[in-house]
Image: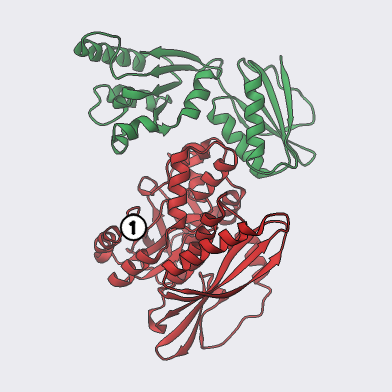
Chain colours: A red, B green
Amino acid sequence: MGPATLSQVLRQLPRLEDPRLLVGLEKADDAAVYQLSEDMAIIETVDFFTPVVDDPYLFGQVAAANALSDIYAMGGRPLLALNIACFPTCLPPEVLARILKGGADKVREAGAIIAGGHTVQDDEPKYGLAVTGLVHPQKVLTNAGALPQDVLILTKPLGTGIIATAVKAELAPPEAQEAALASMVALNREAASAMLSVGVHACTDITGFGLLGHAAEMAAASGVSIIFEYDRLPLLPQTVELASMGLIPGGAYHNRDHLGEAVTFAKSLTPAQQMVVFDPQTSGGLLIAAPPERADRLLQELHARGVTAARAIGRVVERQSWLIRVE
Amino acid sequence: MVKKEVDCRGLACPQPVLNTRKALEEITAGQVIVTVDNAVARENVTMFASNAGYPVQVAEKEGNFVITITKGEAPEKAPDNAAKPVAQSTGEARPLIYFFTSNLLGQGAPELGMTLMKSLCTTLAETDPPPDKLIFLNTGVFLTCTNSPVLQYLQKMAERGTDIISCGTCLEYYRIKDSLQVGRISNMYEINEALRGPGKVITVP
């Protein structure tokens, strides 16, 4: 669902005032955090969607990596996961078995276990996980801690939504498809462990609202503004070229329209380049706000752990009339 | 003039773009008139057609968007009916496109080829108006990167509005993608569309 409609709906829910709920709905964060004891809090998150790739096993992996990502973005480690699946009667059950196998393998890679799940009959397959993670209550990373002068680091390339649209149109070059798939199945575990070892101010993962949607949430929650340098953005192969052919998912336009005046662009950026930063991502990377003196070390740690796409893409500034500027 | 109507109402992304592309391929010259019922399809079809170099006109009509794309010849006077234009990007008669497939001009001694290439680019940079588009392919992409002997002339053309595109596969093959100095990166699809589009193409071998 688009950010505008979603916030409209969520506004109608009653506000919860429970001191044990460290992170709830009102922060527009990735997951809920609930304190159990002085040194223990659980992170709860759920995410599921329709297939983004044809291969059921790979789809299972992507969906699981995407669901687990919220735990990593909050600074936690995943413990338990429950499958959520929708499946039509017209498809052979082996397809569902492959999807679940993909999910199970990815969860095992994350060091967590699948403890059960729920499947309902539906016209279109859908799959995802509800995940429980563990974190120290004082070490929860939210999107609210970014400070002026922080360096913003993104750990995966952008463009999965545009490439998925190009795949549907049968116009995606194989190297773009392969790179998108490799990026989507990758866990954010190594990125998270690098960030925890260095110590950072804020983090969120980039998913359906696109880079700018999630960055705007970070900026709003932190009371700051953000400047991105377009030339530094890691992009999947051919992303801008495919975007300029009009292969842009509707979600990207919804994300753009939702942010409206909160975003400004340098005049030199083409319409297609501007749309890339709104592209909804599946199993996207972490956007990390790191103090400037630690940014280089964080990048080294990320690259050393195999998160080779990670780049410094911008910086945090004092709150301006705009939330985000792309130069 | 040939007019081809494409009804894309009720179709999900990316189908309207694909249907538009197919319709444009089926005519050599004329207009393709695409009707879509949502803003996403309007933006994507417009983006596709403008990038392929065709003049595009968008009008809102009874809750739908009517996108008129002109191929091959200058459009006739727009009909004065109820359709109200909301956006317009006009193109001049026939865009002039130079297609560089090598970093040297002509066969023979490489030094001479380079001198001739410099001389061609100097001339192009001084012509008025400058070419609409320069496409660089294979070793041609060395001309748009660091250490190119013609960089200043290309930059001069870019400042005057020439669209300069380099083949992404070629930049990657020669491992010089990071040293691109002028223009933008594109793919074979766009290059092919430009070569077969309405423009006049001059190949620089």
| Element marked by disc 1 | loop
Q: Residue at x 72, y 23 (%)?
A: B4
Amino acid found under the numbered disc labelled 1: Val
Q: Residue at x 24, y 22 (%)?
A: B149
**Number of marks:** 1
* Whether residue B69 is visible: no
Quarter of the image for the N terminus of chain A: give it: bottom right
Q: Position of residue A274 (x, y in %)?
A: 49, 45
Query: Relative to residue B43, is residue A239 drawn left or right?
Result: left
Q: Residue at x 32, y 63 (%)?
A: A149
Query: Relative to residue B24, is residue A181 drawn left or right?
Result: left
Q: For the residue carrying disc 1, how many other residues have a C-alpha within 10 Å: few (<14), some (14-19), or many (20+)?
A: many
Query: Relative to residue B1, is residue A220 drawn left or right?
Result: left
Residue corresponding to mark 1: A307
Q: Residue at x 73, y 54 (%)?
A: A90
Chain of the residue where label 1 is placed in the rendered structure: A
Give the vertical position of A291 relative to B34 (above or below). Answer: below
The quarter of the displayed image where residue B127 is located: top left
Q: Position of residue A246 (x, y in %)?
A: 57, 38
Q: Position of residue A254 (x, y in %)?
A: 61, 52
The quarter of the displayed image where residue A288 is located: bottom left
A63 or B49: which is nearer to us?
A63
* Whether residue B9 is visible: yes
The quarter of the displayed image where residue B65 is located: top right
Q: Position of residue A299 (x, y in %)?
A: 28, 59
B25 or B147: which is nearer to us?
B25
